[in-house]
Amino acid sequence: MLQAKLGIAPIAWWNDDLEELSDDVSLDECLRQAAEAGLTGMETGRRFPMNMDELGPVLDRHGMSVCGGWFSGLLLDGDIEVEKERITEQLAFFKAAGAPCIVYGETARSVQGARHTPLADKPKLSEAEMAVYGRKISDFAEWCAGEGMPLAYHHHMAAAVETESELDLLMKHSSVPLLFDAGHMAFAGGDNFRVIENHFSRIIHVHAKDIRKSVVDGLDRSRESFLDAVIKGAFTVPGDGSLDFEALAKALAAKNYEGWFVIEAEQDPVANPPLNMAIKGRAELKRVMGVAGYEVTV
């Protein structure tokens, strides 16, 4: 039987790009709520200490582990040696924590954190530019793996690799492992099932992010930003949105994906209390994992 683990990202509690969309709770309370929801892993966020001497006892208190975490990469315009220095502390921390991977998000030229920059103004690369970038990210990922920590590339709205065609080009011109995010790909207008079919051999981490299709479809991308979309409620947890996670879980199971399914849904924590959302998302994932033939482990 295939093995799966269920985790969550702290962005449901604290939004790193828009702090007004944050629940004023401590790290301890965040982990307590995630554990109460039945989840066993948490990705890191801005309130996490970057060492296991401090974090380890807090994780142990709630039976939680580190199941990944974001690194804001700048390789598109930057130097690989500089990026190695920038990631060194997180890499050592994640090795000590036994994390499955570091989530690489390309933030160079990205407008994901720019409140007043429209989605349509995202960076766009030619195939020649993507080929150069692909070689850089491949070399960086190979170095990270050689240091003992895999890198998982996160395609992301408002970034250089957002759409299905952009992801196809990156996969063509690189060897970097992939984080598959159903919500971001659906938001970008891509076909999640085709992405799984085409790139399953590269998928090492999954973000279980849902979308509210009515919100996404109603956006004016020539005027509204990524953060505008988040505020309007574009994202939510599995079971609360428009995506068919049962079919997605079956598609991943058919390709023998094993590992983490991490709930990641940034939204207003007042309108969508994080504990309630975590319980709902975990219940839906547990259901679809069972239907797809996964055994959920801790």
Image: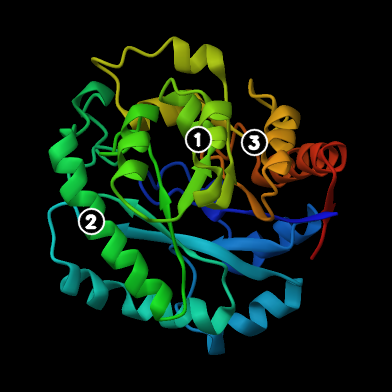
Q: Amino acid type of disc 1? A: Asn
| Residue plotted at (69% across, 55% down) | 258
Tell whether 37 sits left or right of 45: right
Q: Is residue 127 above or below residue 41?
A: above
What label does residue 198 carry, if any?
1
Tell whether 55 sits left or right of 107: right
Q: Amino acid type of disc 2? A: Arg
In three-dimensional space, the C-alpha distance between marks 2 and 1, rounded to whole angstroms, equals 20 Å
- N-term mark: 2 or 1: 2
What label does residue 44 carry, if any?
none
Q: Is residue 74 visible?
A: no
- N-term mark: 2 or 3: 2
Q: Which residue is mark 3?
A: 237
Q: Amino acid type of disc 3? A: Val
Where on the picture, by quarter, is residue 27? bottom right
Residue that sits furthest to the bottom in the current view: 53
Coloring scheme of the render?
rainbow
What label does residue 135 carry, if any?
2
| Residue plotted at (66% across, 84% down) | 57
| Residue plotted at (30% across, 60% down) | 138
Q: Is residue 259 above or below residue 96?
A: above
